[in-house]
């Protein structure tokens, strides 16, 4: 399906507006989190509350009002197919576990796909008042300031983000940490993969690796990393792949080969989508 740059621009503008509204609502819940009823999903570290659901509903409603023919995939309420060729992919609160524990390491993540490729990415971290934003071919920004990654930072002179969840064995996580340390690197884990991908785009982390993530966790960050001059492993967004998990890896230019090696990825098969 053909695409017009104005089609992307209009959705980018809406994503930037709605992420602020969603972030304000999420932060309101955050300030009174002790009153939330917390439910367990996959395991005791995988939690959800009315905050996640209501923030997703706010985003869904605003997108539907503006682009009724667009598809929409949210972590809490699943996929609604559209007919326009565009699909919004949303995590209303990425980092719910830090959120309910009173830590600031959470964000609202919005991506827009066109023909299975992320063309818009917007991530808002309300506790830090930071909005990371990108659109295909337009570059990436943090609070309006352009982000541009260079080659100076490597795994040996900067930090790498890693992620883990109940889909990944302790032995696999241990090997990632061991291989990274043996290569001269060091690591950090914040509890929000989307936020750590935003940090890769901002040059705060040199890369991020998680062996299993969902589309709503990574696609917004992927768009921002790519537009900032970084690299990412393609995510299988076609068909049922969009609703299933997959390995996620993103890196600044100076860390791509090292992190591909640590992740066991053949560089010949890993061109970004």
Image: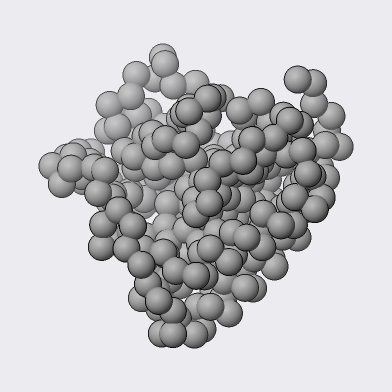
| Res 171 quadrant in image | top left
Residue at 80% across, 26% down: 3
Q: Nearer the viewer, residue 272 or 6?
A: 6
| Res 270 quadrant in image | top left
Q: Is residue 82 left or right of residue 254?
A: right
Q: Nearer the viewer, residue 80 or 14?
A: 80
Q: Position of residue 238 (x, y in %)?
A: 54, 24
Residue 212 in sight here:
yes
User: In what quadrant of the picture does the C terminus appear?
Assistant: top right
Count of marks, rendered view: 0
Residue 56, compared with residue 197, is above or below; it is: below
Q: Nearer the viewer, residue 237 or 40?
A: 40
Residue 161, compared with residue 235, is above or below; it is: below
Q: Position of residue 29 (x, y in %)?
A: 53, 78
Residue 204 in sight here:
no
Residue at 36% across, 63% down: 47
Q: Is residue 4 left or right of residue 164?
A: right
């Amino acid at each position: 399906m053909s695409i017009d740059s104005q089609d992307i621009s209009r959705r980018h503008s809406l994503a930037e507006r709605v992420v602020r509204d969603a972030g304000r609502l999420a932060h309101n819940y955050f300030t009174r989190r002790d009153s939330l009823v917390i439910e367990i999903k996959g395991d005791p570290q995988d939690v959800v509350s009315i905050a996640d659901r209501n923030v997703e509903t706010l985003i869904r409603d605003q997108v539907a009002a503006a682009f009724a023919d667009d598809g929409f995939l949210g972590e809490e309420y699943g996929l609604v197919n559209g007919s326009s060729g565009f699909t919004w992919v949303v995590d209303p609160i990425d980092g719910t576990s830090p959120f309910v524990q009173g830590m600031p390491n959470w964000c609202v993540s919005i991506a827009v796909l066109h023909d299975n490729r992320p063309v818009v990415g917007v991530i808002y971290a309300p506790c830090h008042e930071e909005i990371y934003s990108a659109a295909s071919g337009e570059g990436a920004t943090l609070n309006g300031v352009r982000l541009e990654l260079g080659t100076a930072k490597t795994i040996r002179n900067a930090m790498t983000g890693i992620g883990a969840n109940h889909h990944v064995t302790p032995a696999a996580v241990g090997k990632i940490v061991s291989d990274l340390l043996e290569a001269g690197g060091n690591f950090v884990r914040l509890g929000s993969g989307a936020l750590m991908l935003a940090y890769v785009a901002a040059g705060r982390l040199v890369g991020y690796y998680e062996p299993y993530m969902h589309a709503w966790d990574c696609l917004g960050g992927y768009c921002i990393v790519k537009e900032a001059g970084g690299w990412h492993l393609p995510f299988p967004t076609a068909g049922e792949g969009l609703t299933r998990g997959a390995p996620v890896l993103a890196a600044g230019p100076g860390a791509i080969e090292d992190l591909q090696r640590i992740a066991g990825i053949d560089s010949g098969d890993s061109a970004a989508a």
